[in-house]
Image (tube, rainbow, N blue to C red):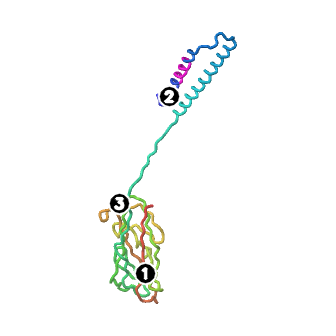
Amino acid sequence: MIKGSVDQNLTISRTQQILRIIFHYLGKIKLKHKNKPLNNQIKQVQTMKKLVKIIAVAAFAIGFGVTAQAQVRSDDMTVSATVYDAISVEKTADLNFGQVMKGAKKYIKPGGGAASSDGENVSTAGIRQGGFKVFAGAGSNVILSFNNLTELVNGTNKMPIIFNENEAGDEETTIGYGTESSSLTRLNVATSNPITFPTSTVDGKNGTYVYVGATVDAAADQVSGIYTATLTLTATYN
């Protein structure tokens, strides 16, 4: 038997008990004024009948209210949360183009090494690919974004820097994430990069590397000097 039927039967039983008690006490009430005229006795009986009806209706209303209340239903929902390690970013190395010849494009590869559009022997003095380490929960939704760096500056002088393009102007992944520079997932500097964070261990935690290479384009009349800029990587849970 379901719960609603049990509650309803209990309510009916309680109502019946109430009515029995009412009639029990009414049966003990004696008519007053026996020697009074018959009309007075009839009126008294009629008043008692009305009282019984009122009490019966009230008892039924009480029982109905309890029954209605017993028919309320409920359901459950699951509340859950997934806890991840705090997200963090660490620089591993600055990107350095070393010596750049005027009128040439110089390309620093994300795995190291350099190439130049002038076809001459490329200076490798001081060159280095840049890098970051990013730590986040395995399988979490993460957004990697950069500050859309487009140029290096020397005072008022500027020199373009180009990502995901080599010294010949061909499209090539120069910035991306992965455990090895030879198999990178490309990242765009100009737009945000939503990713499913990989499962890999870096420094004893779940993390990945971001390798940074790029190409600079020195004009034929480029002013000599040291050109610098800042590339910022921001990682956030999505």
User: Looking at the image, which residue is at 34% across and 72% down?
Assistant: 92
Residue 35 picture location, percent across and down: 65, 9
Residue 94 picture location, percent across and down: 36, 76
Label 1 sits on a secondary structure element that is strand
Residue at the left extreme of this rendering: 204
Distance between the alpha carbons at the discs numbered 2 and 3:
55 Å
Lower position in the chain sequence, tag 2 or tag 1: 2
Q: Is residue 164 left or right of residue 123?
A: right
Label 3 sits on a secondary structure element that is loop
Q: Which residues are magenta?
A: 15-24
**What residue would you read off at disc 1?**
216
Label 2 sits on a secondary structure element that is helix
Q: Please name whichever residue, 139 or 40, is drawn nearer the observer in this view of the structure.
A: 40
**What residue would you read off at disc 3?**
199
> How many other residues sit within 10 Å of disc 3, few (<14), some (14-19) or many (≥20)?
some
Q: In front: mark 2 or mark 3?
A: 2
Q: Is residue 179 left or right of residue 143?
A: left
What label sits on residue 5 in the rendered view? Answer: 2
> How many other residues sit within 10 Å of disc 2, few (<14), some (14-19) or many (≥20)?
few
Rendered position, 77 above or below 184: above
Distance between the alpha carbons at the discs numbered 2 and 1:
82 Å
Lower position in the chain sequence, tag 2 or tag 3: 2
Q: Quadrant of the C terminus?
A: bottom left
